[in-house]
Image (tube, helix red, strand yellow):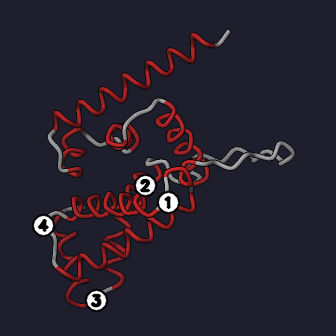
Amino acid sequence: MDESHIHKLIEDYRLRGDQAAFRELFALYEKQIWSYILSRNFSREDAEAIFQEVGLSITRALQKQAPDQFVALVFKITKDCIVDFFRRTSRKNRMETPQKDPDEPRQEPAEPGDPLKQWMDFEQCRQLLTECRLTEEQQESYALHYGLELTVKEIAQRLDAPTETIKGRIYLGKKKIKAYLDRQKRSKP
């Protein structure tokens, strides 16, 4: 979608309170916002709470001023909401996962494109990145690059960081993941 259409939607929402314009605008980035949040080690319930806060924060930000770069605003707000959530909750509570009941029936595999399958993929990714001991910055850069398939330049713009820093985070993340997988391979009989 071109920038002029995005700016028109922003102005329609800001000046006339056009909810349909906001819904269309938000829908453009909804999947990326959701993916970004889920890549940050949250339970489904916590991710939904953050997602709602992101939507509210975007509406508040747009009411104050029209941003020059809406995409950058969206991901800055998303990152800020995640940081706020981290501050409000203890890491222990966030990282605990409930024990599965061995008598509970197995869930059927999800169909391709099914949100449940995407969630399971994110959970597997979250678990792997956590076990590999990537820093938050490495997880974020790695997930944006490989999960959302953003370029290093796009990630640098969204995170307001130098491209060399993003490259380093991705490189170190890959290195830690490779070392973890090598250790796993050697430890299996």
Q: Which residue is mark 1?
A: 47
Q: Return the x and y of residue 43 as percentages of the image width and height.
A: 56, 55
Q: What count of labels does the image hold?
A: 4
User: Quick one: label 2 or label 3, which is nearer the N terminus?
Assistant: 3
**Callout 2 secondary element:** helix
Using the rendered view, name the quadrant where residue 151 is placed: top left
Q: Amino acid at mark 4?
A: Asp
Q: Which mark is residue 68?
A: 4
**Callout 4 secondary element:** loop
> Contact, CB < 8 Å: mark 2 with mark 1?
yes
Q: Return the x and y of residue 92 as percentages of the image width and height.
A: 54, 50
Q: Which residue is mark 3?
A: 17
**Quadrant of the drawing holding the C terminus:** top right
> Contact, CB < 8 Å: mark 3 with mark 4?
no
Q: Amino acid at mark 1?
A: Ala
Other-residue count near label 2 (Cα within 10 Å), few / some / many at <14 / 14–19 / ≥20: many
Q: Residue at x 19, y 81 (%)?
A: 64
**Quadrant of the drawing holding the N terminus:** bottom left
The Cα–Cα distance between marks 2 and 1, rounded to whole angstroms, is 6 Å
Q: Return the x and y of residue 117 as percentages of the image width and height.
A: 60, 47
Residue located farthest toward the bottom when viewing the structure as drawn: 16
When the figure is inspected, residue 65 is found, relative to residue 68, above or below; the finding is: below
Other-residue count near label 4 (Cα within 10 Å), few / some / many at <14 / 14–19 / ≥20: few
The Cα–Cα distance between marks 4 and 1, rounded to whole angstroms, is 27 Å
Q: Is residue 43 left or right of residue 143?
A: right
